[in-house]
Amino acid sequence: MERDAALILVDVQNDFCPGGALAVAEGDQIVAVLNRYIEKFAAAGLPIVATRDWHPEKTRHFKSGGGIWPSHCVQGSEGGKFHPQLALDDRVIVMSKGESPDADSYSGFDAVTSDGVRLGEWLRARGIRRLYVGGLATDYCVKHTVLDGLKEGFKVVLLEDAIRGVNLQPSDSELAIAEMVRAGAQRGAESSVIS
């Protein structure tokens, strides 16, 4: 694996998994796959970042504030926690997005560390040039993270075995993947990434 690579885990939170407020069908099915990626990247000493939606109770992002989504991933809530089986430890850097009541913040590149460093800046400071991206949901936060990563000059590998979509329309995830690939993302999976 490349020494300038990092693993980005996008919003693998309870509210996006079955039983959550904005559940993605089979969203929990990616956890075991992501855990294998985490172990591989950690063993190689490569950075791992977990982004999370971290909304205030009142935000324009929610239907109650004029947005399109039900309340989800509220700061400090059970739904805002990472999936309990996701193997996060002190090797994983957590970055939060959507903290402003005036922002939607789909992209992981809107996320910041606890001391306010944005994802792109954090990655560049560590010499990272290639991102491996998986998480939830394919057609929203994963898509925006991948597209913004490409716009910021990173090479991006979409981990197709570690994503699931909302699919408000049945083909949304398929269209999102096609858009990411057209923009320059490479397709990847465990069999090709972890060898």
Image: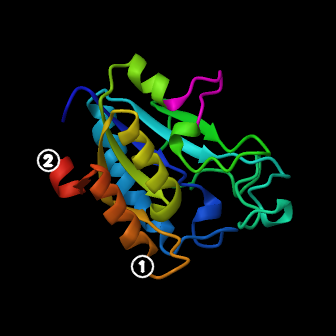
Q: Nearer the viewer, residue 45 or 133?
A: 133
* Other-residue count near label 2 (Cα within 10 Å), few / some / many at <14 / 14–19 / ≥20: few
Q: Is residue 169 above or below residue 140?
A: below
Specify the quadrant of the image occupied by residue 116: top right
* Other-residue count near label 1 (Cα within 10 Å), few / some / many at <14 / 14–19 / ≥20: few
Does residue 86 show up?
no
Q: Nearer the viewer, mark 2 or mark 1?
A: 1
Secondary structure under tag 1 reads: loop
Q: Which mark is residue 188?
A: none
Does residue 187 show up?
yes
Q: Which residue is mark 2?
A: 195
Question: Which x, y percent locates residue 129?
Answer: 29, 29
Question: Which x, y percent locates residue 145?
Answer: 46, 47
**In this rendering, position of residue 35 left or right of residue 55:** left
Residue drawn at 71 percent across, 67 percent down? 68
What amino acid is at disc 2?
Ser
Q: Is residue 94 above or below residue 105?
A: above
Return the residue found at the far top: 125
Residue drawn at 20 percent across, 48 percent down? 193
**In this rendering, position of residue 9 left or right of residue 183:** right
**In this rendering, position of residue 173 left or right of residue 178:** right
| Range of residues picked out in magenta | 111-119
Query: Magenta part mainly helix, strand or loop?
Result: loop
* Disc nearer the start of the sequence (2/1): 1
Secondary structure under tag 2 reads: loop
- The quarter in which the N terminus is drawn is top left
Q: Is residue 90 above or below residue 15?
A: above
Badges 2 and 1: C-beta atoms under 8 Å apart? no
Q: Which residue is mark 1?
A: 171
Report the coloring of the rendering.
rainbow
